[in-house]
Image: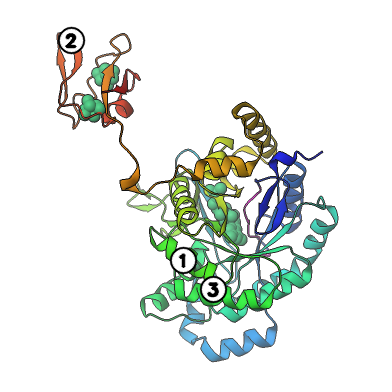
Amino acid sequence: MRDERLFVDFAGVTLPSPIGVGAIATFMGSSIPDEDVAKILLKSAEAGAGYINVGALCSLPEDYVKRKKREVASEEWQQIIRKHFGGRPVRRWMKDGEGCFLHRLGALTPYGIPIEGFAKSLELKMPIIKMLMEKKPEDVPLIANIEAAGDPESFAIASRRAEEAGFDMIEINVSCPFFATVSGNVKAFLDGKFIFSNMGAIMGDSPEFLEEVVKEVVKEVSIPVGVKLTPETGFPRVVEIARRVKKAGASFISTANMGVTIPPPDIYNRGKTTLPFTDGNPFIGYGGEPLRPIVRKHVAAISMFVPELDILAMGGLMNAEHIIQVIMLGAKATGQCAAIFFKGIRYLKAELEFIRKFMEEQGYNSIEEMRSVGVKELRMADEAVDIAAKASIDENKCTLCKTCVDNICAALYVENNKVKVSERCIGCGLCVIVCPAKAIKLVPA
Ligand SMILES: Cc1cc2nc3c(=O)[nH]c(=O)nc-3n(C[C@H](O)[C@H](O)[C@H](O)COP(=O)(O)O)c2cc1C
Ligand code: SF4
Ligand code: SF4
């Protein structure tokens, strides 16, 4: 039995709940077999997910790829791809602090050695897609995450084929961190040109190019189209990007994909990488906790400046409270990967239970009501009103560790073995956040 209070109207499609699993690419021969991904996705729908997203789908006719390759692929570029990936899919994980994963995925591009595998991933995954269509609950829409080549036409072709295959929505993936950090792509970007290669996050952070991609895709399909952003896009550039994709006909934005980073060097081993079983320290993707502030920024900026676009927020949403937070900033739907990796699919069910109970307790009758209440509170930096406050110290809790005094604030001092607050206190709250004993709070000035 569905709980209608959790329904959301997302880009004109009704989702039975605002949560789901973000796109997870699988490539032939990688460590997560496609069948298992299908089972995982079905399990997520059973647990209450409001949509199913099938990651990294591409579909380009062979003659098209051959033609493009002849037209634009330099021998130099093909050599780079061979050198870097050698046709063998690479997947490696490590943890970088609580709730943060680093992930290396040896990308296969339309020029990569198993070119057929990538350019035909939609066709190759059809058995799995059919299984999803047959077994998923009828009211759970299927989103095709389209990852094509470095030209708008390829996205249009692949999107049309995804619609023909029965998908309900298109999510244009122009935000892969792996493609963005391939040396050939970085060189092309620095040379100021796009090449017929998937350039990942470089494409997603290039407003003109992105606008063209969306225009071409929207022309080709009749289902809702959205764009998955990269967390590499900053503020206020994200607003420009949102405006352009809206103008080009997109109805939603998903934010965000993994970001780009590099593993910490092993300082006790001459700077070698800490990424296991890897020689050389490579740029890789990261997800989880550190993405959350970036995603909040994207969501709030888009909902303030381009409110006509629906938002699917993801990146560092580790629990139901994080989900509610981004909804209150303007997201209509949400996605999670890191939380699912660390806590399992069953966690979705617990989160939905939490959200249901939360809505009851707080008196919200719908997700939309919760969303609009939060959005009303959004302000630019100069528009929020500061309420005068000052620090107050609970002497019973203070352990006299002196962290707050031995800091950057000149308003705190020790007198008779007690921490005191002088008149110079401006109520900034730094001492509150640094006190290990939670002995300081702000009170009205
Ligand atoms: C193994 C793996 C594969 C992914 N594949 C895709 C993909 O194919 N398409 C996509 O748009 N995002 C992909 N992502 C990004 C996630 O959907 C998500 O945006 C990202 O992990 C941030 O969310 P999180 O912090 O909850 O993990 C992938 C992430 C991981 C870890
Ligand atoms: S940081 Fe907290 S516990 Fe330490 S001296 Fe300041 S008030 Fe006391
Ligand atoms: S609130 Fe700010 S100014 Fe006041 S005592 Fe604490 S750190 Fe200093």
Span of residues in magenta: 20-28
- The residue under label 3 is 198
Residue 412 location (% of width, % of height): 18, 22
**Is label 1 in a helix, a strand or a loop?**
helix
Disc 2 and disc 3 in contact, CB within 8 angstroms? no
| Left or right, 290 with reference to 332 | left
Look at the image and tell me in which quarter the N terminus lies: top right
- The residue under label 2 is 417
Q: CA distance from mark 3 to mark 1?
A: 19 Å
What numbered label is drawn on residue 241? 1
Q: CA distance from mark 2 to mark 3?
A: 64 Å
Question: Residue at the spot x=63%, y=32% of the render?
Answer: 359
Identify the mark nearer the N-term, 2 or 3.
3
Q: Residue furthest right?
A: 134
Q: For mark 2, does the 10 Å Cα neighbourhood hold few (<14), some (14 to 19), or many (20 or more) residues?
A: few
Look at the image and tell me in which quarter the C terminus lies: top left
Q: In this rendering, is residue 162 above or below 258?
A: below
Question: Residue at the spot x=26%, y=32% of the render?
Answer: 428
Residue 21 lies in the magenta-colored region: yes
Discs 2/3, front: 2
Amino acid on which the number 3 mark rests in the picture: Asn
Amino acid on which the number 2 mark rests in the picture: Asn
Residue 287 location (% of width, % of height): 51, 50
**Is label 3 in a helix, a strand or a loop?**
loop
